[in-house]
Amino acid sequence: MRFQALICALLFTSIVANAQVDDIKRRSSENSRSKSEGSSSGSSGGSLSGCNPMFCIDMFQLIGTAQEERLKKTEIVKRVVSLEMFFQGAFQPSTYYLFNPRIRGNWGLFSTDFRVNYLIEEKTDSVTHDLTTLDWQILQLNLITAQNFTLRVGGGNLYERFGSKQSFFEWTAGMSFFSNSQTFVVNMEYREAKDFITGAVPRREINLSFEKQVFNAGGLRGYASIGGVYQRYYESVSVWGLQGGLVMRVF
């Protein structure tokens, strides 16, 4: 009961941050202009060498074998094939609000992960400023999926739904530690988006969270989560704070 009271107190608690939505948008616009100027001055294209046929065949066989072996573990480690839904957010009362709804599908060696990152700033003139990024980790590889541990890396796309609506490559690395009963989970994740034309880093992010199972209904498990998030946009604007929410897992 004490833990559940703590969850209620921390759920959607404050971001101890000085986020500047307009400043993030300005940095994004500057990066877009730099990219346009660079492309107008001409660019040199490199040639892509083809894949050695035998190497490609060996790689596909290796991946196929790894996927087959991973799927055999489903009866022992049920989350090998699973769906995870995260309903998380945080806020600083009357100033900043951050929401991160997210869904991840796992199928053996592979995962795909989609997240909405929505930041709202309410200023003294009662005008609301906001920005949204859509973060899709198109392909993640579950390098380790054991009873008590998961390690994954992946790559995908960060899309800015503001300004010139730029897209960037984003990679992630994450790990999760599970108790034997799967009722407690500790998660750590790192994200980094990169503009390879201008060299800018649109966002870096570190996430830490702790989950406790609050209900189990057959193949559906619900977890209350608390944790912290740190985001840095264009190496100049920082957002950090406490997070809380609910995580649903379907095995």
Image: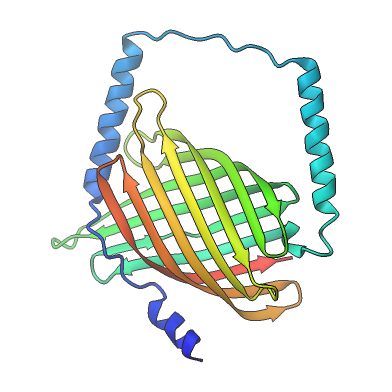
From the top left corner, tell me how far across and down residue 171 is, in percent.
51, 40
Image quarter for residue 26?
Answer: top left
Q: Is residue 19 above or below residue 14?
A: above
Tell whether 159 sits left or right of 223: left
Residue drawn at x 35%, y 15% is: 39
Q: Residue at x 57, y 55 (%)?
A: 175
Front residue (pair 247, 76): 76
| Viewer-proximal residue among 102 and 60 | 60
Q: Nearer the viewer, residue 192 or 249?
A: 192
- Residue 154 in the image: above or below residue 79: above
Image coords of residue 73 (percent x, y): 82, 57
- The answer to whether 124 is drawn above or below residue 37 in the figure is below
Q: Residue 228, how many percent across, how many down?
A: 40, 64
Apparent side of residue 110 relative to residue 134 in the rendered image (left or right): right
Residue under the image location 81 percent in, 24 percent down = 57
Q: Residue furthest left?
A: 125
